Amino acid sequence: MSLINNISKILLINTLVLIFLIIFLETLLYVTRIVIDRPTVGWIIPTKEMRAIEDPCENKETHPILSHVHNHQNKCKLLHGQTIGEYIYYDDTIDIKNKKIIVALGGSTTDGFYKHYSNGNTWPKLLNDLLKKNNYNDWIIINGGVGAYNTSQEVLKLITSTLILDKEIKIVISLNGINEFPNYFGTNEFLNKNFPFFTRSQAYMIQEKKWLLQSKQYFPYFPNINSLIKYIFGNSDYQISQRLKNKFDDGSFVNIYNEGSNIESVIDRYAYNLSIMDAVSKVNEVKFYSFLQPTMGLNGIQNKAPINTNDYKILNKISDDYKLELNELYDKLRLACNKKSYCYDITEIANPDGDNYYDERHHNQNGNVIIASEIFKQIKNNLN
């Protein structure tokens, strides 16, 4: 009996020591992230943002062409619409053979899988509501937006997925702009010029000859230890960016590198992508619309908000450096957009007049209502 008691004591002591060591390591790593100015992931319990990744609606996985797609596994419970593959259908039934289709493309503002920005009330969902409200009952919206997509992913999705759908697609709408930053995907000038459709993840896979697992599977506790494990085994975004920081133009790309690209900047890339989306749509007898999206911090009405409002609090958190970079980008995007008859600059709507934004890059439901209404006004003549 004493032997059993001794073994029990030893197990208990070892268990307590192990728990102490785990908590100590978690704490040490938590403090280390603060010291080296890395984003916090929580302590013992992950942050709300980290826990959200566990939601099948928000989890993503690697795609060989599009860089990433939603990893919903048919388990995503949406507030509005239903998930079928890469798309969300805003209709009461899957049988839509007699419906005319509008496909929405874009980044996180468009993404119907994201529920946190506007409780699922994205502009495509609200545009679908406007169709019903105005008796366009033979039309529905299919939402193909994916968080972090820019026009490079949109044009690839349009060609490889959207236009081959066995549906009566009549209109394709792209809301874009904010994700066109030169370094948005962790790339550099060499990649932006010569491989404008590559993201950092795709460059990593080519250079390292490895398949990158981008799906996020987090143990629900001790996020700092989890982060360290992912760093050691090479699955952290930080590690990938460090590895590739100055190595994009080495021999890893010699087999696919072609001299003489016409893409000299992200503005060239943006204009090229819009031209391709319009041309491909025309070939398939589809009307293409591109809308340059409004965003907080742009000079003018997007940089003003009533004092003590939600928008005012968000606006005051934006750095001057971000505003400078944002306006330099948008000044050029506007010029490129205005040269195309199918591109509409709507950057001066849904401004921060009190409660239109969720954060500096995303509108809430109130802002999305304004965006959907403006898009409806522009496409209305093509709904008859």
Image (cartoon, rainbow, N blue to C red):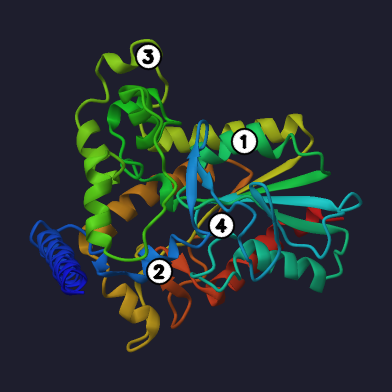
SS type, badge 1:
helix
At label 2, which amino acid type do we have?
Gln
Please name which of the two marks, 2 or 4, marks the residue nearer to the observer.
4
Q: Looking at the image, which residue is at 8% across and 61% down?
A: 35
Q: Nearer the viewer, residue 23 or 78?
A: 23
Residue denoted by label 3: 257
Residue denoted by label 2: 302
Location of residue 50 in the rendering, given as x and y in whole percent from the top left corner: 36, 63
Q: Nearer the viewer, residue 132 or 239?
A: 239
Residue denoted by label 1: 277
- CA–CA distance between discs 4 and 3? 33 Å
Q: Looking at the image, which residue is at 22% across and 57% down?
A: 225
Q: Nearer the viewer, residue 263 or 105?
A: 105
Location of residue 373 in the rendering, given as x and y in whole percent from the top left corner: 66, 68
SS type, badge 4:
loop
Q: Do the residues labelled 4 and 3 touch (CB within 8 Å)?
A: no
Instruction: Looking at the image, tell me whether mark 3 or mark 1 is earlier in sequence order.
Output: 3
- CA–CA distance between discs 3 and 2? 41 Å
Quarter location, residue 306: bottom left
**Dot 3 surroundings within 10 Å: few (below 14), some, or many (20 or more)?**
few
Location of residue 166 in the rendering, given as x and y in whole percent from the top left corner: 81, 39
